[in-house]
Every structure is written in C-alpha cells, then in structure tokens.
Amino acid sequence: MGATALALMLASASYAQTGLLTVHADGRHLVRADGTPFFWLGYTAWELFHRLTREEAARYLDNRRVKGFTVIQAVGLAEFEGLTTPNAYGHLPLVDKDPARPDVKDGPRNDYWDHVEEIVDMAAARGLYVGLLPTWGAHVLPMWAKDPVVFTEANARAFGQFIATRFADKPNVIWILGGDRPVVNEGVNTLPIWRAMAGGIRAADRAHLITYHPMGGSRSSTWLHDEPWLDLHMMQSGHGSRDVKAWEWIEGDLALPRSKPTLDGEINYEDHPINWNALNGYFRDAEVRRQAYRTVFAGATGVTYGNQCVWQMYDTGRTPIAYPEMPWHVAIDRPGATQMGHLRQLMESRPFLTTRADQTVLKANAPNADGHVRALRGEGFLFVYLPLGQTVTLTLAPFHGRKLIGWWFDPRTGESRRIGELESTADLTLDAPGEPAWGNDWVLVLDERDHDWSPPGRARSPNAPGP
C-alpha cells in the first residue's frame, strides 16, 4: 500500500481519531474510552517544541500522519539549552530557570507554552497523540549533560500541576516522565522528585496516562512497577549495539505481578551511529525493522521509532549532535519511517487485543540476536517474524484440525503474498521468499480460514469479528 492510500485509510478509520486512552482489562494493551484498540506507533521528536516554527511543525506532523504514526514524543523543557535558548519566537519556558515560575503571558501566541499548546492542538487535528515529557531528565539528574539541574521535590510538584492544568483538557496527551535517565544512578535516587511531579500532575489531571522514559539499556519497571501513578512501562533498547535482546525485557515486564502494558519507547534510531561512533557504521532500516517487529511480537503494546537527524531537528546552522547526515526535513522521508507504518497496518488488520507472544509454536529458534524468530498468536491467527528470511518449522497444535490460509507479509513494502490453504494437522515447514540474508526479513501470517480476513496489512471489514 502506497503512502497516499495509507493516509486515506487512516483518515477514514475510527482509530485515527484522538480520545482519552486507558489500559485494557488484560493489563497488556491500550484502548480508547470506547473500547477500540490503540496501537502505539511512536516517533521521537524531542526538540519539536523548542526548535521548530509553527509552519515547520505542521510540515512535520503532516508527514508523520501520512506515514501512520500515532504518538509524537516531545519535550517541554528541552535538553539542549532548553532553559536558556529561546524557541523559534524568542520565548523561554521559565523565568530565571525556575520550574515554579513558568513564563506565561496574557494573549495568544505570546509565550513558550502557547506554542506548545498550539502544536498539541495541531497534532490532535491530525489524529495524533503527543507523548509529552514535562522535562528532559537532564534537569533532574545531569550525568553527561551540561544543562542545569533545576528540580527539587517542591518545584517538581508545582511544575507538574502547572503543566497538567494547562493540558488537562487535551484528550491527545500522554504524560511521559523521565527523559533518558535512570531513576537511581550511582547512589543518587531521584524517585522523590519524579513522584512529586507525578503527584502534581495527578492533582490536576486524573484522566491521562503516565509512563516513564528511561536511559538506554534500561526499563521503567526496574524502579517504578509498584508506583500507583505509573500506568504503563517503557524501556529504551537504545543505540549501542545490534545485539540487544529487547524481547527479553518485554517478557520480563509482562511476567510481573499485576502486569502493565509495556513498549520500547526508543529503539535503535535509523541513521544513528552504532554505539555513538560513526566509524562503527550506522543503524539503517533493516535494524529498525528487526528491533520493532521482535519487540511487538514479544507482546509490547507498540513501539517508538526515531531518526538521528529528526529528534534533534538538525538543520543548516545548528550544531550537530552525534553525526547527523542530513537535515530533519529530508530525514523524515527515510525508508524506515514509511516501513513502521506497515507494522501498524499489519497489527490493525487482525484483532490485536487478543494477541500474546507464543514461542511454543516454533520447533527451533536461534538464541542469538541475528536470527532470533518471534511468534505472536491471536484469536484465529499467527504472526511469525523471520529476521533473515530463513526457513521455519512450526508445530500447529493451537490450530489443530482447522483449515489455515498462509501469507507472506513484506515489512519493507507492506504488501502480502498468498501462500494458499494449509493443513494444521502436522508440523509445517515453510521457506520465506528469496535467499536467507540480512535485510530479507518477512512475516509469516497464518489465518484460520473461517475468519475470511482481508490480506495482512489491509483494513479489516467493519463486520469482522474481534476487537
């Protein structure tokens, strides 16, 4: 399906509209208030509010909508001189860098927070949610950053209440605390500050979801699983290695008592230097697909993509951070961004609220990261992701005695090839199209014939069974 067809599909579908989100009764998925399923396909635009004009923001959001993203992750108090360098209209977010004194002026388009609010509304008009970080974590825990630490428990609560009051009536907001920082680091425990900020948010807004974006290589569940204000977990598999087994983190989160939905809120960025060193090469779309599909097929409620040039809104005249290769307005059309929309299409073409990871259907599997296969089973269907386009042998006991229709779904194009009718009475061995190789990844889709679903990746009929 091309970009234009995808845009038309999303514009006409009910799930393209924004409305308050909640956690499904199963503790694993997200739904809208009316019970319709929500797939989190995020995009990190950390410097969106700080660096872009209204016109540039509209261009960015239009592009994200066409490509099928559902959540834009952006930061109120930005990381790079966010407290000292004004936004595109000369406005700073705080008076004297004091979180208890947001710089607010009367009149429209007259302060920093007017600009943030306008972009949030622009996103809503395009059917997009905003994963809004009140602050980047560097303003709480510095680590490698040069930005000033400005938060205490007292002003964190005051700032949380201010920003929640400002955006409480925006149904398309999702609160994300943290911002690339652990809760505890080398004996420094920042939980009291984050707990105070969450308390301030909850004092003004009890309706919107809250999660926490941690540092690369970590997950929020390590510190926050029992926090009552945290609605869903987030991890960051990050940009250090091709060999991160993020599916194990997803499995770990979902195995916790009183499970919460979980997702990888920052997979390896497309066009990011591996381990922050351009001499190691760059992550490209094949790595992005591999991490995204295996995370989702491990049971995540979604995934967040990013591009090294876009999160920082790199452009001519701006100081580059970690070797961006092109301006942000060129990088928004990199292949990985379009391919992430195909993942959403695939998930929404079947009743994904019924899905659970199910590795028991695999007769054998590679333990290493390169060839590791993931299987996701739902009511009446099975998805199997093959990162190298290799041969797979399945045991079909869950479908015993039922007629199946097989498909090959191409993660690069969003197109599917019908294999035909298959028997479920014995082990099944299938070869993916092409020769096994890096970048030749495929999804095997098996449907119970009686459901008569559309080809994988195409919108289901309104009369199709299941959520």
Image: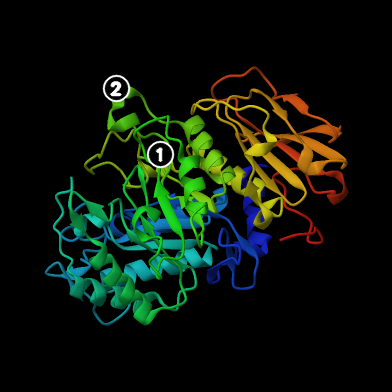
Q: Which residue is mark 1?
A: 269
Rate crowding at label 2 as few (under 14), some (14 to 19) or many (20 or more) other CA atoms within 10 Å.
few
Q: Is residue 414 visible?
A: no
The answer to whether marks 2 and 1 mark residues whose Cβ atoms lie closer than 8 Å is no
Residue visible at 62% across and 19% down in the picture? 436
Q: Residue furthest top?
A: 435
Q: Amino acid at mark 1?
A: Tyr
Give the tally of numbered discs. 2
> In terms of image quadrants, where is residue 432?
top right
Relative placement, left or right, of 229 versus 412 is: left
> In terms of image quadrants, where is residue 296?
top right
Q: Residue 134, image x and y in percent? A: 31, 65
Quarter of the figure that contains the C terminus: bottom right
Q: Is residue 44 visible?
A: yes
Quarter of the figure that contains the N terminus: top right
Relative placement, left or right, of 197 versus 66 is: left
Q: Amino acid at mark 2?
A: Leu
Q: Residue 431, image x and y in percent? A: 72, 22
Q: Residue furthest front?
A: 257
Residue visible at 50% across and 59% down in the picture? 257
Relative placement, left or right, of 106 versus 383 is: left
Q: Secondary structure at mark 2?
A: helix
Q: Which residue is mark 2?
A: 279
- Color theme of the render: rainbow
The mark nearer the N terminus, 2 or 1, is 1
Please name whichever residue, 333 or 295, is drawn nearer the observer in this view of the structure: 295
Residue visible at 82% across and 30% down in the picture? 426
Does 220 appear above or below 364? below
